[in-house]
Image: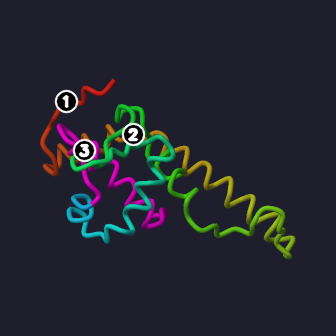
Amino acid sequence: MILLSRRSLFAVAAVVDIALHARPVPVTAKALAARHDLPPRHLETVLQALVRSGILKGLRGPRGGYELARERRRVSVGEIVRAVQGSEEPTAPPDGAQPKSSLLAGVVVPAVAAAGEVYLGELDRITVEDLCGRAIRQGDADPQVDFTI
């Protein structure tokens, strides 16, 4: 069972794709959308959230697009998920609004929140470098050296 939202999965795929293909020119949203069969307008909001969080750099102009803001070994899947979850519609009540059920507020929500933190902690152990290595071994990308410092 995959516990991530589609938006989070697309974000991870986009960052790995950019890590694999952003040399020598940045990857355009249009190219990403075509490779992953996604609507470009939906993907742009995900990419902008990743830029705001410092995971990607957006480059403007005719040769613009997206590239990693840091080395791929320094970007974790957990960080990517947190970046796009922060831009999603909240599923919990807004701050200050308490659930009316004491069972929900005192038992269920804290237990699920604690489990979510453990899950994100495990995702923090997986780097974009790890996923790029898997893609290369699987034959989904050509091996290349990442010279970003």
Farthest residue to the top: give it.
149
State the image quarter where residue 57 is shown: top left
> Residue 11 colored magenta?
yes
Residue pictured at 46% horizontal, 39% vertical = 125
The magenta stretch is: 1-29
Say which residue label 1 marks.
145
Residue pictured at 26% horizontal, 58% vertical = 32
Task: Please report whichever mark, 1 or 2, sits nearer to the chain's N-terminal start.
Answer: 2
Residue 108 image offset from top left, x and y in percent: 74, 66
**In the drawing, what numbered circle is on residue 26?**
3
Residue 17 image offset from top left, x and y in percent: 26, 50
In the picture, the quarter occupied by the N terminus is bottom left
Task: Please report whichever mark, 2 or 3, sits nearer to the chain's N-terminal start.
Answer: 3
Say which residue label 2 marks.
127
Amino acid carrying mark 1 in the image: Val
Residue pictured at 35% horizontal, 39% vertical = 68
Describe the element under mark 1 as helix, strand or loop.
Answer: loop
From the viewer's perspective, tell me whether residue 100 is left or right of residue 36. Answer: right
From the viewer's perspective, tell me whether residue 115 is left or right of residue 60. Answer: right
Q: What whole-number distance in Å separates the C-alpha atoms at marks 2 and 3? A: 20 Å
State the image quarter where residue 97 is shown: bottom right
Label 1 crowding class (10 Å Cα cut-off): few <14, some 14-19, many 20+?
Answer: few
Task: Please report whichever mark, 1 or 3, sits nearer to the chain's N-terminal start.
Answer: 3
Amino acid carrying mark 2 in the image: Thr
